[in-house]
Image (cartoon, rainbow, N blue to C red):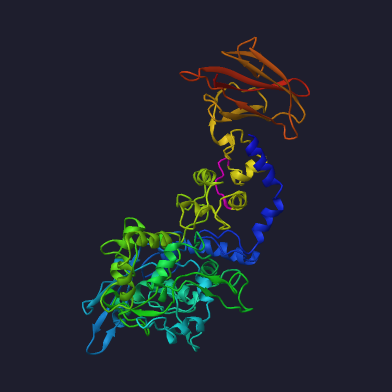
Amino acid sequence: MSEYTGLAFALLASTAMLASFATAQNQPQPKMGAPLRGLAATERTRFDAGSIDFRHVFAAPEGLGPIFNQNACSSCHNNPIGGSGSITVVRFGFYDPKGIGFDPLSSLGGSLLQAQAINVACSEVVPGAANVQAQRVTPSALGLGLIEAIPDAAIASRETNPPSPAVSGRAHMVTPLETPQGPLRVGRFGWKAQVATVLTFSGDALLNEMGITNRLVPAENAPNGNVPLLLQYDTVPDPEDGPNGQGLHFIDRITDFQRYLAAPPQTPRSGMTGEQIFASVGCTHCHVASFSTRNDPSLEPALRNQVIRPYSDFLLHDMGPAADFIAQGQATVQELRTPSLWGMRARDPLWHDGRIAGGTLAQRILGPTGVIFQHAAFGSESETSAIAFAALSPADKDKVVLFLDSLGRAEFDANGDNVLDRRDLAAFLAARGGGPYSPDAPQAVFDFDQNGTVDNVDFQTFVLVYEEDCNGNNQNDLLDVLYGSSIDANGNHVPDECEHCQTSLGFAGGGTLAISLCGDDLTTAGSAASFWLRGAMVGAPAFLAISPLAIPVQVLANEWLVPSWPPTVFAWGFVADSFGEVRLPVYGWGGGGAGPSVATWIVQAGALDLISFDLSNALSVQLGY
């Protein structure tokens, strides 16, 4: 108790420090799917409203279809909501390398196949004229606003100043849908870098994935180009997306959500040996670690002048036979945009068509047909780096995988399940005071300030992001314990009421008095729990009756005395506090030799009120001695 109490007092005394962490620039990274730090109140409101719309399931009367792929944005972007997914779509076309090149077969509904329809008569198929067919897996929308805010020149400069003779990335110059008269912008979204802005991304996807016309693309897709079928089954006037009461269209609201999505975290934030090896073999020639967003007064402060680490150059590269052989805009059949790697640890499947699926991240990276194998395709710009990676020792390869596994890991998330709960707390407590820990050590997930130790400074930050709320009071359990709203008699930082509770026998009186005894099970040496009486009048005297047997006796109309009378222990002197409560620590004894003996005690409380007294429920308590 003394060690825990000292820690609690130290942390409670540093409330100002906790507040400073909450407002400092170097604060906990948002988890995947969370909003950007630093959003204004109105921006956070727009993010939350857009999040609801992102999950909205469209129906035919709202304009869904007549041909579509999914009926909600979140159907595809679901890991987490707004992130990547495992759903694929089909692209097709006709490719004649010696003649016309690539024909998307637009008159036959290409190059995107809409796999669903509001009526079977509208169902699309890949036309017989197509000789190329490819799948594309759902990319992530996390951090899109930050990527949009990268200056065009910062991306384009890597085209004119390539980092290596083996790399010749191209900026894909595109016209945003919202500015059809130009100017051209550097594309950065989509597998072909065919989209430059989040609003274009929203408008294009709303039509082509869900069949909802909007102000950016007001013309409906005809099933395999069949206009009479479109006229027969498209009964909702275009554009189907219109303004709400605040004048915002659906595409505006989901754009707000996507622009304000935070980048995936990276834990540790720097210093891993695997990242150094990743760079040494040339992977960062294309997977560029960092950019800075524009210092533009028209940008929201949360997006402006931010250093981000997406691990992409957002350029098109020749991937040789590992490409999709679908041309789009200026992007040729063998070119693909370098995908950003942030959030990598959560992505399954991998590659543009999802061909690498299942198993562990290490298997998806290092397996016989994994990511490195695909990068080594003959003629691919990534071939040189893949060959250099293949020459690494197994230990160094594992270090690179460990680094890639850090891309998307939340701080303090020891078991990597993206939930900060008591399992992570137990691992933190085990690591505290040890070290020094390098960024490659498992305990580095707790070293928030990256000083090589896990200590109370790191714990102060952990308190801010801890998520478990076992008692459902809308305050995380660490704060419950530290601020005294929950008792932690056994010193494990978990509210005792959420642990082992002694059996209640019921027989409650007619009033509001109730008792519980929770924490350890009290049958072993060093065990501790907390007794909690609640529901008394403020300042009311209280007593306990304790006996080895339960022999209920009705003493008043609605009051039952449960322990046998006379009780073995009849204790006075307790007074309800300003909350009408009494809280006491209770300790179990451990015996020597063959182990402790266990006795059962029946415990009941009573409290006086202005007229009479109120009896609580009774507990059956197992106590070691």
Q: Does the magenta stretch include residue 501?
A: no
Q: Can residue 59 be spotted in the picture? A: yes
Expressed as whole percent of the image width and height from the top left, the position of residue 133 reads 26, 74
Q: Report the magenta residues as a range.
A: 465-471
Spot occupied by residue 469 in the image (x, y as percentages of width and height): 57, 44
Q: Residue at x 47, y 72 (%)?
A: 202
Outermost residue toward the top in this view: 566
Q: Which sits in the foreground, 588 or 110?
A: 588
- Identify which residue, 606 or 558, lies in the foreground: 606
| Quadrant housing the N terminus | top right
Q: Which of 80 and 376 is in front in this view?
A: 376
The residue sitting at the front extreme is 436
Q: In which quarter of the image is residue 140?
A: bottom left
Res 616 quadrant in image: top right
- Residue 320's place in the image compared with 610, above or below, is below
| Quarter of the picture holding the C terminus | top right
Relative placement, left or right, of 188 versus 352 is right
By secondary structure, the bulk of the magenta-drawn segment is best described as: loop
Q: Is residue 268 left or right of residue 193?
A: right
Q: Is residue 9 above or below residue 259?
A: above
**In the image, residue 593 above or below residue 464:** above
| Residue 348 makes an appearance in the image | no
Residue 200, position in %: x, y? 47, 77
**In terms of depth relative to the viewer, which is nearer, 563 or 561?**
563
Q: Name the spot of residue 199 as percent of width and height, x first.
A: 50, 75
Q: How many marks?
A: 0
Query: Which residue is pictured at 64% across the width and 12% down the height?
Result: 567
